[in-house]
Image (cartoon, coloured by chain):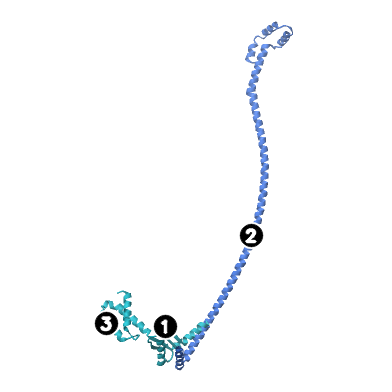
Amino acid sequence: MTFLSALLAAEPAKAAAQGAAEAHGPVGDIIKLFGSFGVDGPHLLVQIVNFSILAFVLYRFAVKPALGQMEERNRLIEKGLADAQASTQRLAEAQQASEAKLNAAADEAAKILAEARNSAKAAVEAAKAEATAAQTEVIAKAKAAIEADRVKMMNEVRGEVSRLVVETAAKVLEQNLDDTMRGRLNEAAVKQLAR
Amino acid sequence: MSAASVRAEAKRLLALSLEGGAVSSDRVGAVLAALTKSRPGHTLRPLLRAYLANVRRELTRGEARIEHAGPLASAEADAIAAHFTKLLGRPVRPVARRNDALLGGFRVRVGDDVTDLTASLRLANLAKSLS
C-alpha cells in the first residue's frame, strides 16, 4: 500500500456514502455495488496513479535495461553467428587456397624435380664429355711426350755415337799419322788455300 | 789529359811508327825518345800504355800466326803469308807454331780473322753433322 492509499483509506465509508448520496439511478447503484466491494473513485484513482508510477519505475529501471541487455545479447549473438559464418566461409576459402597452394607447390616441386633431373643428366653428360676430352688430351700429350723423348734419345744416341766415332778416328789418326803424312796434309792445305 | 785525347795521341804516335805500312823498330825508338824528352813523367804513363797497345795490335795485324800439325816447310809458311798479304793488302809475316793435336793441316790467325784448314776441324764438323 502506498502512502497515498493509506492516506485516502482513512475515510472510505464516508466517501462512499457521500458518493451514494449524490448519485441516483443505475449509476448510483453501480457505484454502490463497487463501494460494497471496497472500490471507490479516489481509491481507484490513487491505485491507478500508484500503478502508473510502479509501471514507470519498473519500465525505467528494470524492463528497459533488461530489454537493452537482451537486445545487446541478441546483437552479440547475431554478431557471433555472423562471425562464425564468416569464419566458416574464410576457413573454407583458406582451405581452398591452401589446397590450391598445395597443388601449385606440388606442381612446382614436380617441375623442379624434372628440371633437377634434366640438369643432373646434362651435368653427367658434360662431365663425361669433359672426362673423355681430358683423357684424349692426356693420351695425346703422353704420346707426344713419348715421341719427343724417343726423338731426343735417338738424337742423344746419335750424337754420342758420332762423338765416339770421331774421337776414336781422331785418336787413331793421331797415333797413326806420321810427319810424312802430316806434311802431305799441310801441302794439300796450302794448295787449297791458294785456290 | 782525358782518355779520349790519350787514345787520339796514341793513334797519332802509331801512325808515326809505321814505315811502309809496317811497324818499324827504328821509328818506335825515335817516338819513345821524343816522348821522354817532351812530356812530363806523370802524363807519360797512360799515353805509353795506349801506344803499346796500339803497337801490339798493329804487330798482330801484321802477323800470320800459323798453327800446324807435323812439319811445315818455310816455303809453305811464306806462301801462306804471301796469300794473306795479297788478300789484306798489307805486309804479313808468318809466325809458325807446331800443334799435333790439329791432326793435319793448319790454322792461320791474322788479326781477328781465322782460317782453319785442319783435319780436327773437319772431324768436328763431321761429328756436328752426324749428331
For mark 2, name the chain: A
Circle 1 packing at 10 Å, graded few (<14), some (14-19), many (20+), is: few
Residue type for callout 2: Ala
Residue occupying the far bottom of the picture: A180
Looking at the image, residue B3 sits to the left or right of residue A77; the answer is: left
Looking at the image, residue A180 sits to the left or right of residue A50; the answer is: left
Residue B87's tag is: none
Residue that badge 3 annotates: B34
Residue that badge 2 annotates: A120
Residue B113's tag is: 1
Residue B71 % position (x, y): 42, 92
Q: Which chain is blue?
A: A
Q: Quadrant of residue A126?
A: bottom right
Q: In 3D space, how far apart are the residues under numbered discs 3 and 2 (Cα atoms)? A: 101 Å
Which of the marked residues, 3 or 1, is nearer the chain's N terminus? 3
Give the answer, above or below, for where A155 lies relative to A45: below
